[in-house]
Amino acid sequence: MITSGLGLTLKPGAVLKIAVDDETMWMLPGELYAIEQGLKFKEEKYDNCTYRGYFNKDGERKGVGIMTFNEDGEKHSGEYKRGKLNGVGKAELANGQIYWGQWKDGLKEGYGTYQWKSSGEKYTG
């Protein structure tokens, strides 16, 4: 058993699937929690997107994951509950803008930061 600084314990054989690089390392606490809760990692392809992340026993997206949209490559990564972004998430939009912040039922809600690609300017609110 491996115990993290967050008080989470990994079982022998647990494999981290998402938080493997600098871009996704911020999702590590959520990934450790998903593993501890017994959520299953898989990649699921839909008509307009692909989701790589954790699912509960009922097949709903739950835990951390990354949704990549086929048409424009837009990415939504973060905490999923009830199949939608809920909690902290990041949206990398097709036009280069990035939104980091809070989500509820797949919609931006609460505190967040927008960053524009062209100028690097940020707006937080």
Image (cartoon, rainbow, N blue to C red):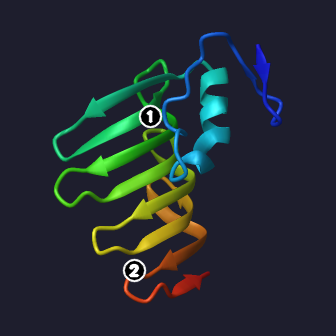
- Amino acid marked by disc 1: Gly
Please provide percent x and percent y for residue 62: 51, 34
Above or below: residue 83 compared with residue 87? above
Neighbourhood count class around disc 1 (C-alpha, 10 Å): few under 14, some 14–19, many 20 upward? many
Q: Is residue 50 left or right of residue 80?
A: left
Q: Mark 2 or mark 1, which has the lower sequence index?
A: 1
- Quadrant location of the N terminus in the rendered image: top right
Q: Is residue 16 or residue 30 the one in the foreground?
A: 16
Q: Which mark is residue 117?
A: 2
Label 2, label 1: how far apart the Cα atoms are: 27 Å
Q: Is residue 41 or residue 24 the one in the foreground?
A: 24
- Amino acid marked by disc 2: Lys
Q: Is residue 8 left or right of residue 63?
A: right
Q: Is residue 20 left or right of residue 68?
A: right
Please provide percent x and percent y for residue 4: 79, 30
In the structure shown, which secondary structural element does the residue marked by tag 2 occupy? Answer: loop
- Quadrant location of the C terminus in the rendered image: bottom right
Above or below: residue 97 compared with residue 40? below
Q: Which mark is residue 3?
A: none
Instruction: Tell me what residue is drawn at x 25 percent, y 57 percent.
Output: 73
Instruction: Tell me what residue is drawn at x 49 percent, y 37 percent.
Output: 18
In the structure shown, which secondary structural element does the residue marked by tag 1 occupy? Answer: strand
Q: Which residue is mark 1?
A: 53
Instruction: Tell me what residue is drawn at x 40 percent, y 24 percent.
Output: 59
Neighbourhood count class around disc 2 (C-alpha, 10 Å): few under 14, some 14–19, many 20 upward? few
Residue most extreme to the front: 21
Instruction: Tell me what residue is drawn at x 50 percent, y 77 percent.
Output: 114
